[in-house]
Amino acid sequence: MLFFLVIELLLGFIFYQYYSIEEEHLREDLSLQMKNYSLSFEGDQFDIEITPYSKQKNPYELYQDTQALYILVPFPESTKDLLKIYYPLSKYQQALSAIQWKLASQFLLLSLIAAVISFWFSTYILTPLRDSLKLLEMFIKDMIHDLNTPLSSILINLKMMDGENSEVQSIKQSAKTISMLQHNLDAYLRDSHLNSEHFDLAALVQEQVDFFAPLYDYLSWDIEVNPLMLHSDKQAFSRILYNLLSNACKYNITYGTVSIKTQKSTLAITNESYGIEHPDRLFERFYKESERGLGIGLHIVEKLCAELSISKRLHIEDTTVTLLLDLGKVTSK
C-alpha cells in the first residue's frame, strides 16, 4: 500500500509539472500564431479590433483578461492606436480541457499499472512472511497442545504431595502460572467454543486471590465480593480475572493495594500505579508500557469480554486505576 501511494504521489507530481509545461506551450503557440497573423491577416482563427495606445503594455506580448488572450500590434506611423489581435478565452479553456482529459486518461492508465505492480510486488514480498507466520502459529498451537499433557500430570501429582511443604507450594504456583499462560495463548490463537455453566463469582475471585497473594506478598488485598451466581463460561471468565489481577499486581506500586469489590452486578478491580501514559491503548494487541509481559493479556480480556457479553469501563483518577465489569448479562436470574 505504501509503495502504491509513493508511486501515485510521484505520478501526480510528474503530471502536474507536465500539465504546466503543456499550458505554457499552448500560450507560446497562440502568441506565435497571433504574431504571424498580424503580418498577413489570413484565416479566421483570431479577431481584431482597434484599442487606444497604453504605456503599461508592450507590443507583441501575450496578455489575458476575462474575455480573451491577446497581443497588441502598433500601427505604422501611428502613436495613438494599437491593433488588438485576440483569441476567445472560452476556446483557450476548451484547449486546456482537452489537455487535462488527455493527461487524466494517461494518469489513470499508469495508476492502474502501478496498482497491478504494487499488488504483485506486495504479494511476492509478503508471501514468504505470511507462510512463516502460519508456520509459527502452527508451531505455537502444537506446542500448546503438547504442553497440556505434562502440565496436567504435574498438577495432578502435586496434589498428592505434601501440601504444607514450601517447595511443593512454589512448584504448584509455577505450574499454575504456566498453565494460565498456556490458556492465554490458546485463547489468543483459537476461536474457542464457549460453554455456559453456573458458578459463584465470590468463590472464583477467592481462588484467584489465593493464587496471586503469595506471589505478591508485599501487596495489601481488600476483598469485598458478595456471593453472586453467574451463568457463563467459567474458564473464560477465570482468564479475564487472571489477566486483570496479574496486571493489577505487576504494575502496582511497592506495598500498594489491590481492591476487588462488587456493587450489585458490577465487579470493580482497583490498583495503585505509577501512572499510565496511554490509557486509550491499554487493550490493544501487543501494546505495553514497559518491557514486562507480552502485551496480549489485556487484549485477551477485551476479546473474552466481547465474547461473553460483558461490558467493561476503565476509570483512572491520579495514580489509581479501576476497571469496572458489568456482569448484568451473565448474572443468573
Image (spheres, rainbow, N blue to C red):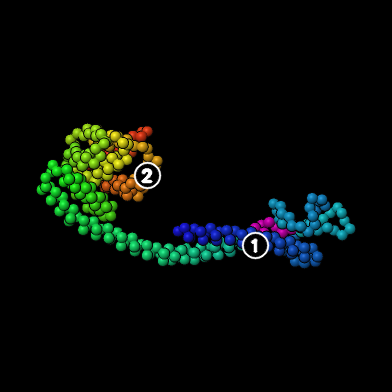
Q: Quadrant of residue 139?
A: bottom left
Q: Of the two numbered discs 2 and 1 on the same chain, state the one appearing first in sequence.
A: 1
Question: Residue 4 in the image: x percent, y percent?
Answer: 48, 60
Name the residue type under label 1.
Glu
- Residue 268, disc: none
Q: In this rendering, would 247 be left or right of 79?
A: left
Residue at image x 74%, y 64%? 33
Question: Residue 1 in the image: x percent, y percent?
Answer: 45, 58
> Which residue in the structure is indicated by mark 2?
289
Q: Mark 1 and mark 2 in contact (Cβ < 8 Å)?
A: no
SS type, badge 2: loop
Q: Is residue 233 visible?
A: no
Segment colored magenta: 86-94
> Which residue in the structure is indicated by mark 1?
22
Name the residue type under label 2.
Glu
Cα–Cα span, label 2 and label 1: 55 Å
Q: Residues within 10 Å of mark 1 (few under 14, many from 20)?
A: some
Q: Within the magenta stretch, is there residue 85?
A: no
Q: Quadrant of residue 207?
A: top left
Q: Is residue 271 visible?
A: yes
Q: Within the magenta stretch, is there residue 89?
A: yes
Instruction: Say which quadrant the C terminus sits in.
Output: top left
Between 234 and 50, the residue placed more toward the observer is: 234
Of discs 2 and 1, which sits in the foreground? Answer: 2
Q: Quadrant of residue 106?
A: bottom right
Q: Residues within 10 Å of mark 2 (few under 14, many from 20)?
A: some
Q: In this rendering, would 102 be left or right of 206?
A: right
Question: Residue 331 in the image: x percent, y percent?
Answer: 21, 39
